[in-house]
Image: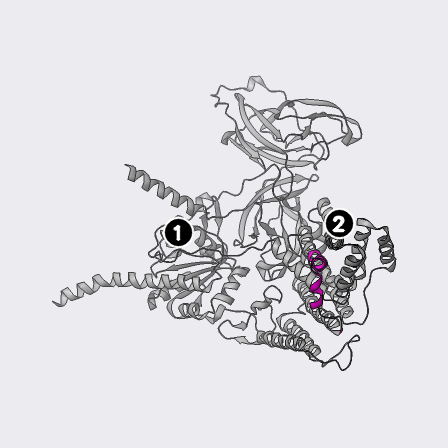
Amino acid sequence: MAKRYLALLSALLIVGLVQAQILNPVKWSTSYKQVNDTEFDLVFSATMEPGWTIYSQHTSPDGPVPTAFYFDKGSHYQRVGDVKEKGAKKEGPDPLFDGVIVIKFTKSPVSFIQRVKVSDFSQPITGYLEFMTCDDERCLPPAEEAFSFALETKKTNAKPAETTPDKTAQTQETLPEPTPLFNDLTGAKTNPSGIKNPVQWQIALKAAEPGVYDLVFTAQMEKGWAIYSQHTSADGPEPTVFIFDPGSHYALIDKVKEEGKKKQGPDPLFGGVEVIKFIESPVVFTQRIKVTDPNQPIQGQWMFMTCDDKQCLPSAEVPFRVVPAQNLALIGDEAGPDLSGQVVADVDAQYGIAKPDLSAPAGQCSDVPVDSTEKKGYWNIFLLGFIGGLIALLTPCVFPMIPLTVSFFTKSSGNRRKGLMNASMYGFFIFLVYFLLSIPFHLIDTINPDILNDISTNVWLNLSFFAIFIVFAFSFFGYYEITLPESWQNKASNAEGVGGIVGIFFMALTLALVSFSCTGPILGSLLAGALSSDGGAWQLTTGMSGFGLALALPFALFAAFPGWMQSLPRSGGWLNTVKVVLGFVEIALAFKFLSNADLVKHWGLLKIEPFLALWILTAAGLAAYLFGLIRFPHDDKGVKIGMPRKLLGLASFAFAIYLATGFMYDEKAGSFRPLKLLSGLAPPVCYSWLKPCDCPQNLNCFKDLEEGLAYAREVNKPIMIDFTGHACQNCRKMEEHVWPEPGVYNHLKNDFVLISLYVDEKIELPADEQVVVQKATGGTRKLRNYGHKWAHFQTEFFQTNSQPYYVLLSPEGQLLNTPVGYMPDDKAYEAFLRCGLETYTRISKEKAQPENDKQLGENR
């Protein structure tokens, strides 16, 4: 008996783990709002789980699939304008899409609004929306949601009818139990995105007597938050209001009643206006209704405002819909078209193979992690800032100050201990100055968490950075100096005479000001990097702290160990060389920002060919300078080229040659060779004039499951199903960096039949294949194109919906080993392929053995 329970528990665990792989991080709801007698706003609202995003309708088609809305045609309505979108947007390069500039919504909620003008209210407005969602490591295939709006008009500004119940019309009927059916409108108290949602609502439908129901709205507020009575003064907050769409199938009995702990009095948030508010949970609003046709929906909306003692949130509008006969209570108009009678039952026949047993693959030799993506933390940013500070130390604005400042403190302080203390304090204040420079960005971030992204990660800022970096570069070349206003420097210098700790602080501030011509471009690079990433102000603070620490350390260390200064190189022409080298680096980075703008605007100016050419010229120019072939204004004539400079020149020349290899055509890949060192910096290799990407690695692959299965059975080879997508960047990374490795490539070319199924393919299916299927997450969907078909195949057969995803099967559909996803380790991926091949060889021999024995018996 114990063994049976153990087996049952194991099976349940396996099923649970398999089911848990289906990802559904975006929830959609629909509602509508009447504008006038004939016009309505159709509202589509998306709520994403923390860390997941959806994409704007206007994002670049070279990256993710934009959100799109498809309305079925009809003469009963017409659309007024385009779909408008509202939500917290972020625009900038996305590493998931090889640096393509994308526009995405990073926080819930997101609303899309389409205004329509209706001429016939008897027909619904139907269609479907398409969207794609990603987190910071992967993307799910594009998904669709069907929608249907059954609009009912009412006279604008008309109040809901209030009808006295007709007691003579009551019939004798058995009342159901008064247990409420309800739907929650809930959310985290303060979700990770920072969106506050301090009020949670429930809607319940309770039978009161035959034909009469109580519709109950219950609010639960977080401690310290309040909502307002229906009867509060209109001069203050917005009252809670309930609006019912008119209908002949029901009537309202009296007005909405409200119950809860009230407080009445002047409110300082509204200039002392007297308000009536509910300050403790629960708060219950009840509307009694008489229903004559319980099969018809009763719908409407309620609006409320919530405040604590310091702030108020915008008024919220919540639609509702109840159907008494069905015991149905919903938030929003969530009813879509009923397709249940058209669902395909036999999915095995639909795809030509039997659904595999995921818990029992034929081989168990390659249980490897699906995803080994590494995450970068703030330590990486701190380290980059620290390296930037070390580079700044070697510039002519800073390096000569080290021995002078240390000598000043050690000789003028009276004793060594005090000198060490003052020098250490000086170093600390240098660190503090650069740390404090990042604080204003936090103040901006507090006012609006998205403002840094909104103002910085867009095409115009990339163009601005391009121009700024060019200006910085020519400053480093010596054609002019970039300095802060002289009055700032004079005021800081005069304050040094105060003495003590205050005087030391102003000495540190003076150093920061007078060295700006050298440190400014490096700080500009830190600013650009921080504002172009998700970390925003915190990444900037981390980088600035690393920068300040690197500048500060030498002053404290050399004060503690004065003998070390004897080993420092003397100031000279090499300091100018450092500046010029940094100038060439600024030129290269400038073209990176111009490339970002080009990608989002599709100008076609900096595709992979011109980008590589410009970087090659920059690297070659740096090499020519380091070898003395070209000079800049501050360079001395006849200076002897030292060995370090020659070695750096050779490195620059070697880098130029490496960049030139990016023009080598990869016959296997069918495109230019991708350069790993430029990953995330250069445009995608597919963004090309001459060699746009085609089939990966020039392998013999099939893009139709049925054709691939037939060929595999003909040649008696195992199958690798490659669930991929046109917009899947991890798929491209696997194809460009893992598949070309000899061990992997030989297996794919010689041992497997490759079937690549694109889950975002837009080619329409033939009419007879556009069927309705059951979704793994519940509900139904119609397969309209090949992307729908392959996405359904993946979720239905393999219980996952992320890409890339690799499945090894026998030609008959037997699962050879555990499928895997993104696996950048080519050795592990080769082991996965080898495991599947060995398993197929073994089961083929086992299958052939009975046939051989039978033939031997017949021969005897």
Q: Mark 2 falls on what kind of element?
A: helix
Q: Mark 1 falls on what kind of element?
A: helix
On the rendered structure, is 640 left or right of 672?
Answer: right
Residue at which label 2 appears: 440
Instruction: Report which quarter residue 291 is drawn in.
Output: top right
Crowding around mark 1 (Cα neighbors within 10 Å: few <14, some 14 to 19, many 20+) is some
- For the residue pair 846 and 766, the one nearer the viewer reads as 846
Quarter of the image with the N terminus in it:
top left
Give above or below for 182 relative to 535: above
Q: Label 2 to label 1, Cα distance in Å?
A: 59 Å
Q: What's under tag 1, amino acid-wise?
A: Val
Q: Residue at x 78, y 81 (%)?
A: 637
On the rendered structure, is 362 left or right of 82?
Answer: left
Q: Residue lying at the far top in this picture: please name it.
A: 168
Residue at which label 1 appears: 347
Q: Name the magenta segment's main secondary structure.
A: helix
- The x and y percentages for residue 58 are 65, 56
- The x and y percentages for residue 365 are 36, 58
- The x and y percentages for residue 65 are 58, 56
- The x and y percentages for residue 83 are 66, 50
Segment colored magenta: 547-572
557 magenta-colored: yes
